[in-house]
Image (cartoon, helix red, strand yellow):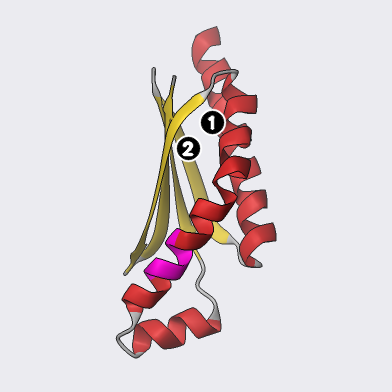
């Protein structure tokens, strides 16, 4: 029989993944092939295997991946309050800090939330 704590944690992780993907799709107009969230005592880590727009793919192919990363970083800073709200609602805890980064090959984003 499953540990109730693990079942609850699994539901929280799934809710965060689902909601962050929804925000990501609505914000970027693009999805992610997979989204995985892990919740520990004081961290929430979400990894998204993201899609790049045609324009972003063109920049990467032209050696301008740093421009894609910089634009995505700026955008993540702008939607940070929405991402924080998703995690706070799902965990019932305040997010003390948020970090976001993008890797271009392979394409994935990581969102890290430090819980208070």
- Residue 61 is labelled as none
- For label 1, count other residues whose C-alpha is less than 10 Å away and answer few (under 14), some (14-19) or many (20+): many
Q: Secondary structure at mark 2?
A: strand
Instruction: Check contact, mark 2 vs mark 1: CB within 8 A.
Output: yes
Q: Is residue 70 magenta?
A: yes
The alpha-carbon separation of the residues under discs 2 and 1 comes to 5 Å
Q: Which residue is mark 1?
A: 13
Q: Secondary structure at mark 1?
A: helix
Of residues 5 and 44, which is closer to you in this image? 44
Q: Main secondary structure of the magenta part?
A: helix
Query: Can you say whether 83 is above or below 10 in the image?
Result: below
Residue 35 location (% of width, % of height): 51, 48
The segment highlighted magenta reads: 69-73
Classify the position of the C terminus by image quarter: top left
Specify whether 103 is left or right of 17: left
Q: Which residue is mark 2?
A: 37
Specify whether 59 is left or right of 52: left
Residue 73 location (% of width, % of height): 43, 60
Residue 34 location (% of width, % of height): 51, 53
Q: Residue at x 31, y 69 (%)?
A: 105
Query: Can you say whether 92 is above or below 58 in the image?
Result: above
Q: Residue at x 39, y 68 (%)?
A: 70
Is residue 49 visible to us here?
A: yes
Q: Residue at x 50, y 55 (%)?
A: 76
Residue 64 location (% of width, % of height): 34, 83
Of residues 92 and 33, which is closer to you in this image? 92
Query: Can you say whether 76 is above or below 2 in the image?
Result: below
- For label 2, count other residues whose C-alpha is less than 10 Å away and answer few (under 14), some (14-19) or many (20+): many
């Amino acid at each position: 029989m499953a540990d109730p704590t693990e079942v609850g944690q699994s539901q929280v992780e799934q809710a965060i993944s689902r909601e962050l993907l929804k925000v990501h799709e609505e914000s970027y107009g693009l999805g992610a092939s997979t989204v995985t969230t892990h919740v520990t005592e004081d961290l929430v880590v979400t990894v998204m295997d993201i899609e790049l727009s045609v324009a972003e793919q063109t920049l990467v192919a032209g050696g301008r991946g740093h421009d894609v990363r910089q634009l995505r970083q700026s955008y993540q800073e702008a939607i940070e309050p929405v991402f924080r709200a998703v995690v706070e609602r799902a965990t019932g805890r305040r997010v003390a800090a948020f970090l976001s980064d993008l890797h271009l090959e392979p394409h994935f984003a990581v969102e890290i939330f430090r819980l208070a």
